[in-house]
Amino acid sequence: MSLSAHLPALQVVLPLIAAPLTVLLRRGQLPYLLALTASWLALAISLQLWVQVDQGGTISYAIGKWPPPWGIEYRVDRLTAFVLVLVSGMAALALPYSRDSIAHEILHEQHYLFYTMFVLCLTGLLGITITGDAFNVFVFLEISSLSTYVLIALGKHRRSLLAAYQYLILGTIGATFIVIGIGLLYLMTGTLNIADMGRRLADVQGTRPVLAALAFLTVGISLKLALFPLHQWLPNAYAYAPSVVAAFLAATATKVAVYVLLRFYFSVFGATQIFTELPMQEMMLLLALSGMFVASAIAIFQSDLKRLFAYSSVAQIGYIILGLSLGSATGLTATIVHLFNHGVTKGAIFLLLGLVTLSVGGTSLARVHGLGKRSPLLSLGLVICGLSLIGVPGTAGFISKWYLLLAALQTGHWWLVALIVMSSLLAVVYVWRFVEVSYFREPRKDLADPNPLPLGMVIPSALLVIATVYFGLDTSFTIGSAQQAAELLLEGVR
Amino acid sequence: MSLSAPTSLILACLLVPVLGSILISLAGRRPNLREGITLATALLLLLGTILLLPSILAGARPSLALWSLLPGLEIAFQVEPLGMLFALIASSLWVVNSIYSIGYMRANREENQTRFYVCFALALAATMGIAFSANLLTLFIFYEMLTLVTYPLVTHHGTQAARDGGRTYVGILLGTSIVFFTPALILIWLVAGTTDFVPGGILHGQLGHAGMAGLLALIVFGLAKAALMPVHRWLPAAMVAPTPVSALLHAVAVVKAGVFSVLKVVVYIFGANNLAEAGLAGAADWLVVLAGFSIVAASVVALFADNLKRRLAYSTISQLSYVTMSAAILAPLSLIGAALHIAAHAVAKITLFFAAGAIYTAAHKTEVSQLDGIGRRMPWTMVAFSIGAISMIGLPPAVGFISKWYMLSGAMAAEHWLVVAVIALSTLLNAGYFLPIVYRAFFLPPRADEADHPHGEAPVLMVVALCLTASATLLLFLFPDLPLALARQAIIF
């Protein structure tokens, strides 16, 4: 077998090996270079996998040549490949950014630990995405979660520890629920392979353990993806984690959790009648809508940009879940494309906020007074990303909103169209709070003259801002992938 | 992509202002060079639109498709007569406005002038995009871009008042386009399978009577730049901007982008004949009534406004509703009148705003009640103002007479007697709020306390600019052939 046949395994194994090596090579620049290499290789592999899937269809890879459903299967379909590109792409941009960023935010002797944990987290997220085995999902979920707790706790703020602890408690509850759900499914189907599970579940549907499994999985995964009202851990985690960690988590962690939800809902439960018999869609719709409105309203009253955009994330997750709850191909396309577009936009925002911290010493609205005068391009970047959150045409957010509205119209939900556009108005309000503070206030007098910002941080941020606009103008990659992924998911339902 | 001459001209018209804005920002530290680049850019753009004109008049419809934004939805441009007319108006008045801006911004020692000229050029790029859009989606992208790049212009002074005005401006323009226009756009795409502007329209009765009326409502309220009541509040709020901004953007580019878009939707998406044939002509009746109300109500507000710019702003709201109302009548003559009125109102209203800015610069006066006897000190300015006022009222020898003639003929032909009454009443109101200003300026003696405030005309660049537009107001009355030909081509094909 040639090397390209082993790409699914390498996707996870390379960063997994790189992580302990960074501990061994703890001195100097070596951990950084190793982590960087691992993340760039991961990106190259996931792009290659995307091309392979695009040309040859779904890839099934048997670990250790044990054929599924007995062995562990790595399964790369269109959705998998799309999410892999998002996760590894974000890591590949975040790592070059991290070197200058953590120099200001993390104690020097802990730097190698940061790289170890970052690469572990990447391993976990890639593993969750690529594996076709339900228990494996849980294992990688724990790898990514544990490393995330450490990454958050590395923040220099005193509250970082508290935020990490808060996330640890809630994250552990979520993971426990997930493993209980998987256990119940294993009990009823006798298999852990996701595709196999989906086939066998049809025979035992409607039994109480299966319903309990659905409930445990829904709550557990919703905790991880911060679906309102299970979002309590998220604002503190984003606000007090080191900037680069916040950016990476905002762009990928919740998105991978959405991916897990899609997997279980469509690939496992898809063939059963549960969704037509239970009011699951209505429930998700209600939670999504509440998230969109409540979290946006809370975002408006935040006095710190990181918290403001964190609450905005909770609201945007509402949009993602809303598309899913409509149950149509267009709605699912909206979910998948927004998962990507929002990842890019929020990644850009939190990378920019790292630069803001460096420039004015914090991200509270009081500190960013006059940012438009002090660092015009930095401020412009935040405005552009803000426009994407609103959904202004020419930005990635517009594409997502287009599909969401299209789905609502196609399913005849006129009132839903009205609610979606109304909630966008709340986004206008919280984005404009930044605009007014940045452009209508004088810069603070107690700040030193602006130093040139480190290029290692500026370039990745700029690339993501450009991507936010690019994916609003050229949608062949995003919409192309999302549409096909949505159709593939729905095949399981039919 | 083969670039035949007109196609590359389209691209040039879109790119010239963008490149100009980049050069302007690079030349920020050298005011003379910066203003030179602004003028050169404006002239180049005008040249580009003029070069496009002959082929349009000859019946060609050059088009340029860039790429697909979404499957089946392209970012594409096509020059048709209405767009040509709008582009010509905007680009020619930008040249005059640049001359005026240089005088105004220097005389009033405004800050952040580089940002001002950069945003102005970008606003013109967006305007060209709107004028040349081949489909509603492309139009929407540039429509939103126009809102965003004019925001720094509206809030130019950076004061509390500017911030509040900017809030209303963005809140209403962005808000309505998100809440009303986006769903309308998607609905059209869903129903018709396209958003292209096609002569005769793309909706062929799929929606029924109530559906059409509802869609039309989403469109006209979504295009709040047309300032139909009750989504007009942004226009007076935007008057906190420096006067050149009010002049070009809030008398020409921004507001005309609104009514132009309404007209384009009625002509190329709904299709006036189409509606009549499907028996749906009544779907626009409510709009005739609302626009008629808007005309009268805004005129009444203007009548009682003492602040000169506020009076002009409400006059604009009223005049824009003429266009919306005539478009909603759907009769060919009134549609031609609507297109003509876009041009007629543009040249006349920009003259009035220029005059208001000149008065502010030379005499530091902003209220109508302060203008006693000012015509003796600023004769050129006030004569130009009077010409603009005559055009607003719709009297010969100003171009406003011609557009009003067509709109009235259309209303009579369609036997819309309500409309005839509205136009008559509004003409009286227009006279009621413009003639007193002319009377004060020329026939009342200056106030006693002003003897020790000697001032003459505003800086020469400003006076030249307002004389140019005043002459255009008269010349278009004498030679209305070009706008008329373009309007005819678009409506009667």
Image (cartoon, rainbow, N blue to C red):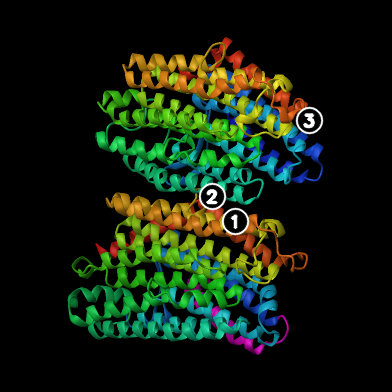
Q: Do residues under tags 3 and 1 come within 8 Å of each other at their CB atoms?
A: no
- Secondary structure beneath disc 1? helix
Q: Where does label 1 land, which residue?
A: A436
Q: Is residue A160 visible?
A: yes
Q: Are marks 1 and 2 on the same chain?
A: no
- Identify the image quadrant of residue B194: top left
Q: Are marks 3 and 1 on the same chain?
A: no
Q: Residue at x 66, y 60 (%)?
A: A378
Which label sits in the foreground, 3 or 1? 3
Spot occupied by residue B296 in the image (x, y as percentages of width and height): 42, 28
Q: Residue at x 44, y 48 (%)?
A: B178
- The residue at which mark 2 appears reads as B167
Residue A186 is situated, as x and y percent measured from the top left of the image, at: 28, 84
Q: Residues within 10 Å of mark 3 (few under 14, many from 20)?
A: few
Mark 3 on the same chain as mark 2: yes
The CA distance from mark 1 to mark 2 is: 9 Å
The segment highlighted magenta reads A2-29
Question: With B131 as the anchor, is B426 left or right in this view?
Answer: left
As measured in the structure, the alpha-carbon distance from the residue carrying label 3 to the one carrying label 1 is: 42 Å
Tag 2 subunit = B
Circles 1, 2 touching at the beta carbon (< 8 Å): yes
Check disc 1: other Cα within 10 Å, few if <14, some if 14-19, many if 20+. some
Residue A493 figure quarter? bottom left
Nearer the camera: disc 3 or disc 2: 3
Tell which of A55 and A47 is nearer to you.
A47
Where does the image place residue B91, in percent across and percent down from the top left? 62, 28
- Name the residue carrying label 3: B452
SS assignment for the magenta stretch, majority: helix
Q: Amino acid at mark 3?
A: Asp
Amino acid type of the residue that numbered disc 1 sits on in the rendered structure: Glu
Q: Is residue A4 magenta?
A: yes
Q: Chain of mark 1?
A: A
